[in-house]
Amino acid sequence: MSEDAERVELARAAGAIIGSWMWDLPGDRFTLDAQFAADFGIALDRTENGPRIDDIIETVHPDDKAGLLTAIKAAIRRGGPYAHQYRVRHVDGAYRWIEANGRVELSPDGKALRFPGVLLDVEARRRIEAERDRAHALAASIIEAVPGVVYAKDRQGRMLLGNAGTTALIGLPPETYIGRTDLENLADRAQAEAVMANDRRIMETGVAEQCEEAVNLPDGRRAIWLSTKAPLYNAAGEVIGLVGSSLDITARKQVEAEHEALNDLLEQRVAAVIAEREQVEEAMRQSQKMEAVGQLTGGVAHDFNNLLTIIRSSVDLLRRPDLPDERRRRYLDAVSDTVDRAARLTRQLLAVARRQALKPETFDACAKLREVVDMIDTLTGARVDIALDLPATPCFIHADLSQFETALVNMAVNARDAMDGTGTITLRIAADRALPAIRGHAEVSGPFVAVDVVDHGAGIAPHHLATIFEPFFTTKGVGKGTGLGLSQVFGFAKQSGGDVGVESKLGQGSTFTLYLPQVAAPIVADHGPPAAFAPHGHGCRVLVVEDNVEVGAFASQILEDLGYAPHWVTNGDLALQALDVDGAGFDIVFSDVVMPGMGGVDLARAIRERLPAMPVILTSGYSHVLAEDAEHGFPLLHKPYSAEKLSSALRATMRGLTIR
């Protein structure tokens, strides 16, 4: 077998060849193999006798006959290789694409002698190529239809394809920029280098990116492009280049910048409006503060001027040498009573401002209400009945007992006046209550003890409910109230960790509810019988610490008159020096709270650390330290105090008792 015949057989075995022929040109005789004859429906006996060319042409698709004959004639005329594709009719009647490959052999004088060849089935290949062409056409259509720039580059950055947007961006026709890099295509070298560096990074990392790129257009305009780039892979998964698309977002960026500028301007205007409104609100608040201060100052001035008038007139009359003893006692009693009233007014003001120095203790609210009900009954008068509604078990609270009693009295008197002095006031206590949402504050779970004071009077107008706890607010006639009673209740409740609420209906009455934190029952300690102590000073040595010269001198004089042996210093440092390390022979320390340098509370704590057995009693008219630290742990005597209260406080403190 010849080498050519062997190659034909191998190709036939691989399925590439579907037939072969030998054409004797001078004799115009075909020699076909059986496969050829079977595929094209030519009778085998005819193949043995040798079909003519017309028999072969008869199986060709009518549209392809002219082209085939032209190709055959050209091959015979020139000699050499021959290849042509056309459709032939198979035995099943269907036309399929084949490719005829052969060679025309010429004699030395150029005469065509032999024309051997093979037939290849290219139907599948033609379908694949057609699909490829359709896919390419579709891809090209899509690429051209995509707005902006679409391109592909090889691993070296050379352009493989580009759409119309790419052509417009580069400013060159495709045949010029295809196969060239950005450095060769773009006039701006810096821009080209930046783009290529970005492309290399994407191809090296294999990670797609989206970025904004500033580019110079061929017409000189500066534009911003939003570019999306991704690696281009081959069938083996290797990065062979890059594909990308870019959109001109210059207009969008301009709009965004304008919106941002507009937002900034709007924010500035809003801020200006808010600032202006805040100024107006601050001015209004300041005006309201000044109005409140004016109301408070006016009320205080009015009440204190009334009290000072009594004191001044009484003192002037007491200076008369011929004043009878009976009137002298009357004027002295008037001065004493007026001072007590002034002290109560001061305590009410501090309670209103929540700046009073509380002395909290744990007590049963039910028991205390039973104790003060007689006093309340006396204050409300014979025409008012007091009804108690108390639980069977104790309700313990931790608060200032004196302020608690004062709050009860103030609410009861307010209820009496609401009923015009006739009717029934119900005092009710309930335990384990939550503190409801009052005046915009959130509800607190508690537990709280709720003390209700219920009347059946005229009720409170809705527009007054928001102001009834304000200082000096009153709906009573002139001279029938200071307007501080409910303010004291409010201040005491808030400073004690509670609140006060009110429910009222016109013509039906009101219910004021005082909420105070509920605590567990106290543990009663057995201190044993109190030690005996002399009812007067009898030389008891008192270290007086007071920075006010008049008060210090007067307190020392009172102590001397009461039989004490006072030693007066003006500040805490001098007091510690006087006490030395062993107390320096003093029996008790009596110190003011508010002093320059070391205050009274700090002094008392220093003394307790150095001399634990030394009793200390504090005194103050007002101190923010005491208002903020009610648990300072030292007995307190409020100013103004009388000589008897001072002596009683000293004796109680020396005995370890509580000052009342």
Image: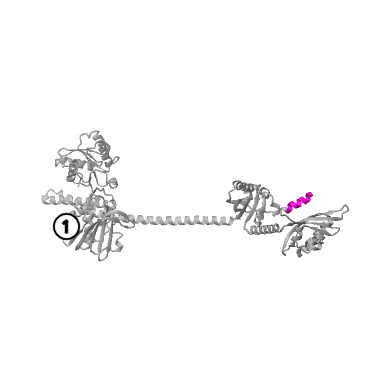
Left or right, 363 with reference to 157: left
Q: Nearer the viewer, residue 130 or 17?
A: 17
Residue 540 position, x and y percent, is 17, 38
Q: Nearer the viewer, residue 287 or 484?
A: 484
Residue 468 position, x and y percent, is 28, 59
Q: What residue occupies the far front of the structure in this picture?
A: 45
Q: Quadrant of the rendered structure where residue 539 is?
A: top left
Q: What main secondary structure does the magenta stretch of the protein show?
A: helix
Residue at disc 1, secondary structure: helix
- Image point 14% across, 49% down: which residue? 320
Left or right, 442 with reference to 577: right
Amino acid type at mark 1 = Thr
- Image point 18% across, 61% down: which residue? 385
Q: Quadrant of the rendered structure where residue 604 is?
A: top left
Residues in magenta, as a range: 1-12
Left or right, 481 with reference to 55: left
Residue 190 position, x and y percent, is 63, 47
Q: Nearer the viewer, residue 103 or 530?
A: 103
The reply to whether residue 62 is visible in this rendering is: yes
- Number of marks in picture: 1
Task: List the residue tagged with mark 1.
Answer: 378
Residue 259 position, x and y percent, is 53, 57
The reply to whether residue 477 is visible in this rendering is: no
| 118 drawn magenta | no
Q: What residue occupies the far right of the structure in this picture?
A: 109
Vertical arrangement, residue 494 with respect to residue 550, above or below: below
